[in-house]
Image: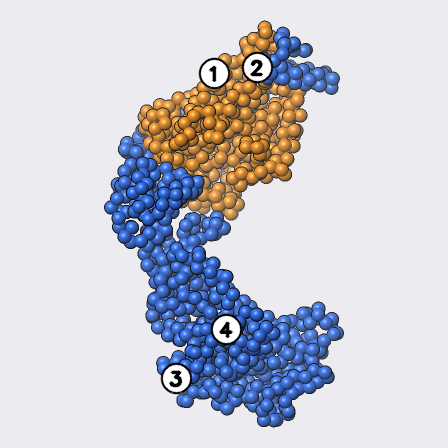
Amino acid sequence: MKKQIDLFKNVDKLSVLLFLLLIFMGWFNIFAAEIKEGHQSIFDISQNYGKQLLWIITAMMIATVILIFDAKVFPAFAWVIYGVTMIILVAVLLFGTEINASRSWFRIGEFAIQPAEFAKFATALAMAKFLEEKRARKIMLFDTLTALAIIVVPVLLILLQNDTGTAVVFAAFVLVLYREGYISGLLLITGAVAAFLFILTLLVNEFIIIGVIAFIGLILFLRLRNRKREQWQLVGLFVILSVYVYFVDYTFENLLQPHQKARIEVLVSEDVDLQGAGYNLHQSKIAIGSGGLWGKGYLKGTQTKYNFVPEQGTDFIFCTVGEEWGFAGSTVVIGLFVLLLVRLVNLAERQKSGFSRIYGYSVVSVLFIHFAINIGMTMGLVPIIGIPLPFFSYGGSSLWGFTILLFIFLKLDSKRLELL
Amino acid sequence: MQFTPTCARLPAKNVLQIVWQGASWINNKLLFLHEVTGNHPFPTMLTKSRTVYYAHRKKIITGIIILTGMVFIIRLFHIQVIDFTYKLSSSNNVLRHITDYPARGLIYDRNGELLVYNEAHFDLMVIPNQARGIDTTEFCAMLGIDRETYISRMTQARAFSPFRASTFERQISKTTYASFQEKLFRFPGFYVQPRTLRQYPSPLAAHTFGYIGEVGPEVVSNDPYYRSGDYIGISGLERSYEEVLRGQKGLRIRMVDVLNRDIGSYLNGKFDTLAVPGQDLFTTLDGVLQAYGEQLMANKLGSIVAIEPETGEILALVTSPGYDPNLLVGQKRNAMYRQLQNDPLKPLFNRALMAQYPPGSAFKVVNTLIAMQEGVINNHSSFSCFGAYTSGNVTVRCRHHPSPVNILSSIQYSCNTFSCITFRNTIDKPVFGSIQAGLENWRQHVLSLGFGQVFNTDLPFELSGLVVSPDYYDRVYGHRGWRSLTIISLAIGQGELGTTPLQMANLASVIANRGYYVPPHMVRAITHPDSLIRSFQQKIQSTIDQEHFDVMAEAMRLVVKDGTGRASRIDGIEIGGKTGTVQNPHGENHSVFIAFAPVDNPKIAISVVVENAGYGSVYAAPIASLMIEKYLTGQINREWLQQRILNAKIIPQPL
């Protein structure tokens, strides 16, 4: 089986190691989070940890299958995969079942599968293919818009499923476009400023903010007395900022649904709604905070044991880490993720093929945004959005989705020299 | 480029080989597909410009990733190491959320008598996950249940949620509560939650007050205030004033140790909120009059509605059969409710507000007023009546009375002929042009007297009654297929007319006031007896001039002094009234009477309906008269009449 060994020779070992570490650490924590009296066997399929073991084994099989495929297959069928996935997303709207108020699932017997998770790598493939084809010519606005359209189609379909959280993660592709030059750094900074202003507007009355901006603007205006052009740019900027601030306030008050509003308010003021959105966040912080430096020990976390934190196996899995492994353990987990992400960036940079590089950055971006939002929300830095922690959270569809996402890239990477 | 594993030809020996072969096969097919659709080189061309020009951005992206990681670590350090607020002490504390249910608002009558109050009781709650190591034998003995019940209730609670509290037993007795408090530490996971139940000093006005019960799932999902297991007003005033009566729930978060002992408040009560007691209601009811009315209506079907004309305040609202409100309180409520629901006499149905009868002869008052307003009759009008009204092949019989009749005597003796003639003249007035316009005009007058609509004050479950419009007749007979003779039954209050006893009492009120009414309502003040509710004090004018009401009041005075209601007159009090006998296709006619007293400066307006009791003068009028006497003088001087009414049993036999 010489060729079989050849197959695995060039695959990046570090990434695979990190992948396995995260999966199994995740599994241990799911076990701790979901264990109940009377169900002691780890293989118990009726429990989530038993199911997760099943997903892990099947995911590893899928990973192997992907490595078997020829690397050429992925760019060749990128559009096909994207197209088919979009059709499946439409199908789930029509034929899917509704769980937790979103129609995002297909039920097959006892299991449920969520196509949105597969849309992530499908979009990455399509994005890589599209941008690759445009590599030879200058960057044009039209291309940027089309690239955005590739992202927007799945986003809209997922929003129609009423699953706002999953739709949000597609914003990650902005980073990919940034790396390829379709979005300037200025735009990225503008985005950061916009986010900052957004939060500020919620904390402080919007007229005060506009007032402060006006004040600063006035000072700069007087400083630029001799340069008419810059002065007009300043005025323009002031108008845009004021409109934006006002718009944010309007959207928050009038367009957001009450439960979404509550989730944002809860970050800002501690006392809001202890029984609803505030409850989740509060319990999450208690769970993590009570871990101290070294944690309470495996299977000994009270908040975990008594199930004070809702969604402990999925969205809030990090709480179990925080409570049972403490600051030390949490830092290790964060470190592993950061290590994986940085490693993938480096792998992406060493690609000769544009397709592989772009796809690699997509993988990084998607994993990064999940990592940032999921852990951020358990600590009260980010509003609570229902998205999983990659490889860690319970969930068959998400585990498969992320595994496929990662291993396609690892396959492309392993063939990077041959493909010149 | 084909890819063939070297061991392809051997049969698959295990799962891995199956997977391997399957994947390879698929891979081959895909490659084949790819090649036959054209030659696409793997995109490997160097894009030097793109790679190199933007290469520095890699550092920025890496920087963002590392920065995020650092932010998280710093935040973690803050929460886990520095900030001790989140650090619960090492003895495995858990939190318990205790809801403080406030006392529900009390309900008083207009004289300050207490009609509805609260009594404390206790629910036994359990958090299944914490209920370990329970000596079930001792537990069951103390609670008085058997082992199977214990197991099934625990399973139910666990199915609801293993870590949230469920009610294990409702309304445990005080002795059980006392013994529980002593031994609570032996039963971790159980605790006692105080609640309140409604109590009634005397069993009256059950329909008016309504009752409270557990809130249903639709309300729980739509209204964030309510949790499953809370109580909510379901009918009557408990329902229409729910938000006033319920107050505001309070919250206390306590820390509890492994022995289930309360060891203090969480974060010094930072998240605790105080319960706000419910506000009291001061109703318009006169408790004495209401009780008396219920006594008089015992063993009869029907209703009494009494209003204070000047203010629209409802003095009494009686529906019979009724029920003892204490029956629908507490644990036996569900069983009692079912029993009451299945009773064929329908005790749960509030006849005063929801029974729609054709008003019968009492409606002649309305038709005569409209005729006066339209000018088709005046004080000199006079018609002959020899026992019937005949036109075409329609005959309407009348009773024996002196002839001819004018406005006053037609009401006094309840003459059908007079009514038929004046009704037709009202509708057929040439100025209207068509029968439709004539009827519509009549209809608008009727509506202005409070018919055909709900009053929309604070009465739950009113029905609007029916005042039919010309469109209905157009549909039934065709646009040219009917005339005033076709609908002649409307003249004597029969046919396509539906009124509720409340609307009939309101009519008496309009006449008492000589032309306007204040929409009838049940509550005059909230929290304090003097803070009257302003929005209920609006006067609504009818479309008929006051001078006509003066005439009608005089006519109604004659009814009682020397007319169809003469058996019900009271010495020393002048009553204005009108009898009615409503035809009932299913049995005996219904007995109806409307009245107000005293005729000058009236203090009470009343309507009485007694089903299947025959002529209005025989039962409805005496009952109204007794009620008036009781209200105005406080006593009854006609013992024999009172006895006759109290002894009467008028319940139809099942057909």
Residue sticking out furthest to the left: B182
Residue B580, placed above or below residue A294: below
Question: Of the residues shown, which amino acid type is indicated by label 3?
Answer: Glu
Q: Secondary structure at mark 1?
A: helix
Element marked by disc 3: helix
Does A341 sit left or right of B97 as displayed? right
Please indicate whether residue A63 sits to the left or right of residue A50 in the image: right
- For the residues tagged 2 and 4, is the chain the same? yes
Disc 4 marks which amino acid? Ile
Give coordinates of residue B191: x percent, y percent: 32, 45
Q: Colour of chain B?
A: blue
Judged from the image, the secondary structure of the residue bearing numbered disc 4 is: loop
Q: Which tint was used for chain A?
A: orange
**Front tag of 2 and 1:** 2
- The residue carrying pointer 2 sits among few (fewer than 14), some (14 to 19) or many (20 or more) residues within 10 Å by Cα, namely few
Residue tagged 4 = B651
The quadrant of the image that shows the C terminus of chain A is top right
| Residue A350 position within the rendered picture, expressed as x and y whole percent measured from the top left | 55, 14
Label 1 is placed on what type of residue?
Leu
* Chain for disc number 3: B
- The quadrant where residue B46 appears: top right
Horizontal and vertical percent for residue A92? 61, 35
Which residue, given by chain and number where applicable, does mark 2 sit on?
Answer: B14
Disc 3 or 4, which lies upstream in sequence? 3
